[in-house]
Image (spheres, grey):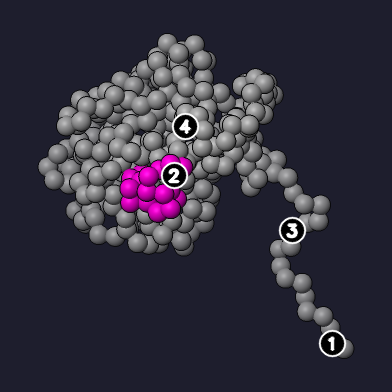
Amino acid sequence: MDERTGEDIYGEKHKDANEPIFSGIPSFLKLPTAVEEEELAESDADIAILGAPLDTATTIRPGTRYGPRAVRAASTVPSPPYEHFNIETGVDPFDTFSVVDHGDATITPGDTKTSQENIEDAVASIVETDTMPLVIGGDHSISYPDIKGWAEANGYDDIGLIHFDCHADTGEDGLTGFKYDHGAWVKRVHDLGIMDGDNYTLIGPRGFWPGPDTYEEMREAGMKWYTADDVAEYDLSAIAQDAVDRATDGTDAVWISFDVDVMDPAYCPGTGEPEPGGLMPREAFTMIREVTKQMDPDHVGFDVVEVAPQYDTSDTNSYNGGITSGFANRLCIEVMGGLALAERGLESGSPIKPKEPLRTAPPAPADDD
């Protein structure tokens, strides 16, 4: 693609960081808004941020209805809009993509199914403008309408799914008998007939749910998983590569779904179902970078779910986000960074390195003789 910069995409305001982070409307990263469908079509955006503030399909602790608002609040810290050069990877997604905040899908409190259908329609409308959906939940039930709306609007017959989660979410009837709850969305996607088990990989499960019968059914369906212990033991890039190979084998596109409860609650306490023994942020960022840089930006979708800010630490009012919403914000930027590398056909970016090579081993002790 042609070389361009954030200034080419966003104009003179690209370098304008005069507004304090606590001022103004807290759109995602303080990026331009295109809430109406007509605005989105006219924006010619590459990526649209969509909030899906639904939590009536959760089964333990509610509160993810405030997830999109909290992640947006956290996203205003600390960088100015339009400029997010990652010092570790050496890539700035805003030199590649035009990104807008498309607002939230319409939620009808008390009517979970209608709300999910509205989310499906909102994602489909994004796709119809030739824009990639990046969805912020909301409980994990939103992934079913996300994927359904995305796949049907694109006309995909076969998709791959890379799923980061503490739980498998493959229950036949959900956790308490509602088959569209947040513990059954993978099964609902599988029932659509657009995803084979061989194209599905789960990363990070641990703890005590679901039981052995469910995992035996997953194994029979060809599904694969790497537990949190596996993540600690194996090479992270190898896990990511295996997930990519499986997701892209004979498929039209890939959806990536990230539940923040895959993280250890020491790092992401703000979620409905925390479980000790989860991933560390560096592990998650390494794998998400390895996955996204191998995706086709024209045939991928992403959601991050289960941020419940009232259980978070450091800011229970979400005026500028707690540590969990801050993690989710950073994750979204990492996804866009990996996709920017993919769009430019690069394996890695251009981080700025010190003149003196970094030490890889401590200096040898001095010879006393």
Q: Which comes sooner in the sequence, label 1 or label 2?
A: 2
**Crowd tier of the residue under label 1, counting other residues whose Cα lies within 10 Å: few below 14, some 14–19, many 20 or above:** few
Which amino acid type is shown beneath numbered disc 4? Pro
Left or right of 87: which side holds 211? left
Residue tagged 4: 26
Residue tagged 1: 368
Which residue is drawn at the image coordinates 43% and 41% (left, top)? 319
**Crowd tier of the residue under label 4, counting other residues whose Cα lies within 10 Å: few below 14, some 14–19, many 20 or above:** many
Give me the C-alpha separation between circle 1 and circle 2. 55 Å
Residue 194's x, y, as percent? Answer: 31, 29
- Which structural element holds mark 3? loop
Q: Which comes sooner in the sequence, label 4 or label 2?
A: 4
- Which structural element holds mark 2? loop
Q: Which comes sooner in the sequence, label 1 or label 4?
A: 4
Q: Look at the numbered discs 4 and 3 and tell me whether their residues touch, using CB distance below 8 Å.
A: no
| Mark in front: 1 vs 4 | 4
Q: Toward the viewer: 238 or 273?
A: 273
Q: Look at the numbered discs 3 and 1 and tell me whether their residues touch, using CB distance below 8 Å.
A: no
Which amino acid type is shown beneath numbered disc 3? Leu
Residue tagged 2: 321
Give me the C-alpha separation between circle 4 and circle 2. 11 Å
Residue 173, above or below 8: below
- Quadrant including the N terminus: top right
Which amino acid type is shown beneath numbered disc 1? Asp
Left or right of 16: which side holds 297? left
Give me the C-alpha separation between circle 1 and circle 4. 62 Å
Residue tagged 3: 358
Give me the C-alpha separation between circle 2 and circle 3. 34 Å
Name which quarter of the figure residue 193 lies in: top left
- Magenta extent: 307-323
**Crowd tier of the residue under label 3, counting other residues whose Cα lies within 10 Å: few below 14, some 14–19, many 20 or above:** few
